[in-house]
Image (cartoon, rainbow, N blue to C red):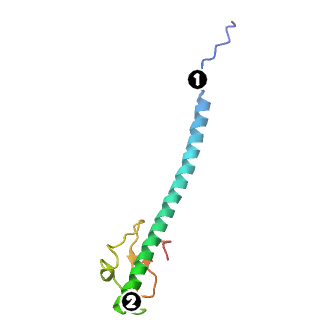
């Protein structure tokens, strides 16, 4: 054997390990962004469903109590007779029932009926 030649031992070089770490980092960043978007989309759908339930309760309250468009509605009027409990926005927004004939409002930006 020549004195300059060394036998190569099994294992990975530093460059190979660094490339693998970079690839894993890129995959994690893509997965995290995708997870965040899915979570936000789920919160939006849940909020819209809550607002639809509040709207239905308002309509039922208006029919049973003889209310007309523009009459004010508050949550004590709806809970517990028409809704079991005050709904909570999953994105920490606050619902406002608004008067009869108007859509329910959520303070979280982008949550609109």
Residue 95 in view: yes
In this image, 6 relative to 41: left or right? right
Say which residue appears at 39% left-offset and 80% top-offset: 57
Mark 1: few/some/many CA within 10 Å (<14, 14-19, 20+): few
In this image, 85 relative to 3: left or right? left
In the image shown, does 81 or 40 lie closer to the viewer?
Answer: 81
In this image, 75 relative to 14: left or right? left
Could you tell me how many numbered marks the image carries? 2
Say which residue appears at 58% left-offset and 40% top-offset: 22
Dot 2: element: helix
- The image position of residue 39, as x and y in percent, is 48, 59
Residue 72 in view: no
Say which residue appears at 41% left-offset and 65% top-offset: 90
Say which residue appears at 39% left-offset and 83% top-offset: 58
Dot 1: element: loop
Q: Are marks 2 and 1 in contact (CB under 8 Å)?
A: no
> In this picture, is 67 found above or below 34?
below
- The image position of residue 56, as x and y in percent, is 42, 80
- The image position of residue 49, as x and y in percent, is 45, 71
In the image shown, does 4 or 14 lie closer to the viewer?
Answer: 14
> In this picture, is 41 found above or below 107?
above
Between marks 2 and 1 in the image, the one whose residue lies nearer the viewer? 2
CA gap, disc 2 and disc 1: 77 Å
Instruction: Please give the residue where the numbered disc 2 appears in the rendered image.
Output: 63
> In this picture, is 41 found above or below 64?
above
Instruction: Please give the residue where the numbered disc 1 appears in the rendered image.
Output: 11
């Amino acid at each position: 054997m020549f004195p300059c030649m060394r036998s190569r031992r099994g294992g990975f070089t530093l460059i190979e390990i660094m490339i693998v770490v970079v690839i894993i980092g890129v995959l994690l960043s893509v997965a995290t962004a995708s997870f965040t978007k899915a979570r936000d989309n789920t919160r939006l759908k849940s909020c819209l469903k809550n607002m639809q339930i509040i709207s239905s309760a308002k309509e039922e309250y208006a029919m049973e109590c003889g209310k007309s468009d523009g009459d004010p509605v508050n949550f004590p009027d709806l809970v517990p007779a028409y809704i079991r409990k005050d709904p909570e926005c999953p994105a920490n927004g606050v619902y406002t029932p608004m008067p009869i004939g108007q859509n329910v409002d959520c303070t979280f930006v982008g949550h609109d009926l």
